[in-house]
Amino acid sequence: MVFLLHSLPIFLPNPLSCCRVKFSHGTIPSPSPSLPISSLSSTPTLPEKSIPTKHKTDNFGSPTAATQEINTLPGMKIPGKVLSSFVLLLLFCSSNYIIQLCSAQDYEFSPAGGGRGGGGGDDPDAAAAPPPAQDACNGIFVTYTFTSREKTYPLVKNATAQGWAFKSQLLVLNAGREELKSWKVYVGFQYNEILVSADGATAVDVEDLPAVVGKNGTILAGYPMTDLKTAIDTAGDFTQMQATVGLTGTQFGLKKGHPMPKTIRLVNDGYKCPAPTRHSTTMHICCHKDPKYKAKVTKTKFLPRQYGDLSMTYDILKAYAGNYQAQVTIDNLHPLGRLDHWNLTWEWMRGEFIYDMRGAFPHKKDSSECIYGAQGQYYQDFDFTSVVNCQRRPVIADLPKELANDDKVGKLPYCCRNGSILPTTMNETDARSIFQLTVYKMPPDMNRTALYPPQRWNINGVLNPKYKCGPPIRVDPTQFPDPSGIAATTSAVASWQITCNITRPKPKESRCCVSFSAYYADSVVPCNTCACGCDDEPPTCDQNASPLPLPPEALLVPFANRTTKAKAWAAIKHRTVPKRLPCPDNCGVSINWHVDTDYKTGWTARMTLFNWREDPFEDWFAAIQMKKAFPGYENVYSFNGTKMAGVKNTILFQGLKGLNFLVGEVNGTHPDSDPRVPGKQQSVISFLKKHTHGINIAGGDGFPSKVIFNGEECALPRQFPKRSGVSRPGAGFLPAIVVAVVTFVLMADRFQYW
């Protein structure tokens, strides 16, 4: 081999050129890396006739290796020893090339976790080596690997409508010095993906799977492995350091290539991630601690409790081998947040079921899913007739007030308020709700320390803000006063916190709306078209058209009875009526803000609430945000009004004692002919101008910039009322100028005869 390397010139123009050897009679080309190794030692087939091989035999009549020659090309002879050395050189160069090729291509991870160790696969020695970037990362290493995809039914010719079933894998490895608690990773799906399953994690921002995640992506939170320990604390045990998530879904709109996401990043507080490194089927990222992030110093074993608009706590009060008793506490922490007739849902991930409940009730009381399911096979001698609920996603509601003192389902503090949770600005006592439940577990969790909370929490109400809830995070056990009354505290066995925040409603997704009117305008600017959504059926109205101006009296009748008034008003005002009229606002609650007067030292407004629903609102409130007019607020005369200290430029209005009940819609005096009448309340609000110099009431400063009813942000009109009888600027002067010019000409002509 040494003789061959020294005697033959070698050229290296590319990675394979190390195997291109120049001989005195010609050049033998390098073999393709895809050829089998056995083909490297075989004699190439020549198009010309073969030339007899000359041999020198040894004492046994066999050719000797030192004198063996093989004709490969006409006129060229290569000794067998040289050929053997050449084959070894080819094998060396080919293996070198394969190593270089692998380093330039994507890194594949084993299905059970990849990396070193990983704890998966039948043969641990067969796991692929980690990429160099993983060894260079000293933070949180996240990898997304596309595995496979195939066409799925229905098969269509349109490539954008063709569905592809894909599989991929997400790996999160803690390669740093600090334990990562409750890991969360954002995956920016972009090809209209529908996530069907996530083995090893839960999708935080979806209610249930399958779910559409291909527009805004989704956040995956670890479950059941939520915390990732360090190699220092585990002696390099990858089963405790990393989590692997198997993703399965359907993708549309990509004819060729691989459905890779836009980006991936760790979304835990205090971490900063650069742009991911991309390959054709993988992408990885290394996230580090943000040096500018100042974490709250707490001496807690678990994560500190987080602040949110709504906080829910899942406390384990008693734990047994096969069941446990839990308590759910709902705290409203937002000054304007609210829930009415709340419905709480979650998902059991490990086959649990609810045996009994106190302080709340599930909408469906049925034990058939347990009897015919895995629960019935395990608990064969169990009486399921008394089981409260066996659904995987139960819907839980608060009990009515009349059951608050019931010995069986009531007698819990902060329970049984018919689902009303008020903000702390109205009543701190009514800002909390509590209920308890007994949960039975399933194997392999049949021991008192195997405790797992339900996932995918979601809560909503009749007309309330939309809350987006995160995954349960383990916190220090909740402390309770000792029930005996002594000066001691008792602790929960385990506690988890679920934090929910209010999301601003998207266009056409509100549940209340606002109309504007003014003393200087004869028309009302109504609520926006489809402000609270439109029907899914083929519409007979225009969903995108601007609403038609209305006469003031039209606000008192339902939308179905406004069409005639709107057309007649348009005819009076010489306005064009489109062939397809705008759709209604479809809102259950509407608020009219009317600028009533405007004088030298102040001005007044009138606010009217309309309830178009059949159910009433008890203890209602409305919050009005004013920009320039807020400092001038003086008084409200039929409501309670308060300037809010914690919310910028906001005035809180509530009903007076005995008048805090906004009734629902009722029939008119003559039900056969009169339209239905909404429940309504009204008050005048006065403002002073001495603290708001330069305020322009007619220019829009007299209208609110945000209106909130019972915690729900209402949709505002896109324009303000226009002063009646005012034409375009400058147009009104043209007739006067023409008359003046004509008069001057006539007068000048007359003066000529004087």
Image (cartoon, helix red, strand yellow):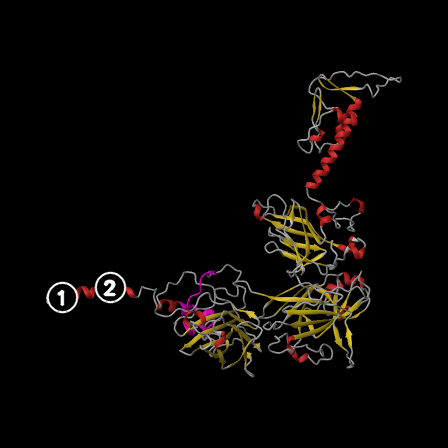
Q: Nearer the viewer, residue 586 or 230?
A: 230
x%, y% of residue 726?
35, 68
x%, y% of residue 225?
75, 58
* 86, above or below 462, in the image: above
In the image, residue 547 lies in the stretch drawn in magenta = yes
Q: Give left or right: position of 621 versus 128.
A: left
Please give the range of residues in magenta: 542-566
x%, y% of residue 129?
75, 45
- How many numbered tags mark residues here? 2
Indicate the quadrant containing the N terminus: top left, top right, bottom left or bottom right: top right
Quadrant hosting residue 294: bottom right
Reading the image, the residue beneath label 2 is 738
Mark pair 1, 2: CA separation: 18 Å
Of helix, strand and loop, which one carries label 1?
helix
* 346, above or below 253, in the image: below
In the image, residue 7 lies in the stretch drawn in magenta = no
Give the amino acid at mark 2: Val
Q: In the orientation shown, which residue stands out farthest toward the left?
A: 753
x%, y% of residue 78?
76, 20
Indicate the quadrant containing the C terminus: top left, top right, bottom left or bottom right: bottom left
Numbered badge on residue 187: none
First of labels 1, 2 by sequence position: 2
Numbered badge on residue 750: 1
